[in-house]
Image: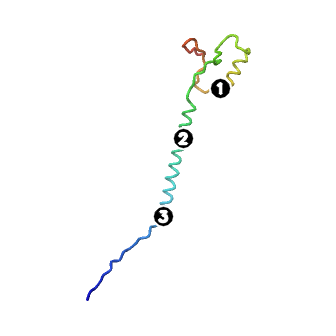
Amino acid sequence: MLLYIQESTRIEAQKEPSDTQNKQHMMAQIRNVAILVVIIAAAVLLNTTEAEDYEVGGTTGWTSFPPGGASFYSKWASNFTFKVNDTLGKYHQTTLLLL
């Protein structure tokens, strides 16, 4: 008498992630998004805080009798948004004279 023994194969169903695993995954995603937001905000702030040098009066420069009279410099300045650490001056040949 021959006896055949069949091996049983067990297929385990994939388990659904537990609530704890879901929460951990969601917290990790939130943390990654928060880090990305901080990096972007830092990059934007660093870009906007760079100091710049301005030649007063632009190509006309600093002169006793500007074209258009005394309002010339007010009109010129209204075209810019000056920030802390910006430098306003006049160029004399190759040297910036600070005002």
- Residue 38, how many percent across, how many down? 53, 42
- Of the numbered discs 2 and 1, the one sitting upstream in the chain is 2
**Which residue occupies the foreground of this view, 4 or 80?**
4
- Of the numbered discs 3 and 2, the one sitting upstream in the chain is 3
> Which residue is pictured at 63% across the width and 26% down the height?
82
Is 47 drawn above or below residue 63 in the view shown?
Answer: below
What kind of element bears circle 2?
helix
Kind of residue at badge 1: Phe
> Which residue is pictured at 49% across the width and 56% down the height?
25
Task: Indicate left or right for 95 with 7 as reference.
Answer: right
**Which residue occupies the foreground of this view, 76 or 30?**
76
What kind of element bears circle 3?
loop
- Residue 16, how many percent across, how many down? 48, 66
Query: Which residue is situated farthest in the front direction here?
Result: 2
Q: CA distance from mark 1 to mark 3?
A: 57 Å
What kind of element bears circle 1?
loop
Quickly name the residue at label 3: 18
Give the image quarter of residue 62: top right
Is 48 drawn above or below residue 11 in the view shown?
Answer: above
Kind of residue at badge 2: Ile
- Residue 73, how many percent across, how many down? 69, 18
Numbered label attached to residue 40: 2
Q: CA distance from mark 3 to mark 2?
A: 33 Å
Give the image quarter of residue 96: top right
- From the image, which quarter does the N terminus lie in? bottom left
Q: Nearer the viewer, mark 3 or mark 2?
A: 2
Task: Indicate left or right for 12 with 42 as reference.
Answer: left
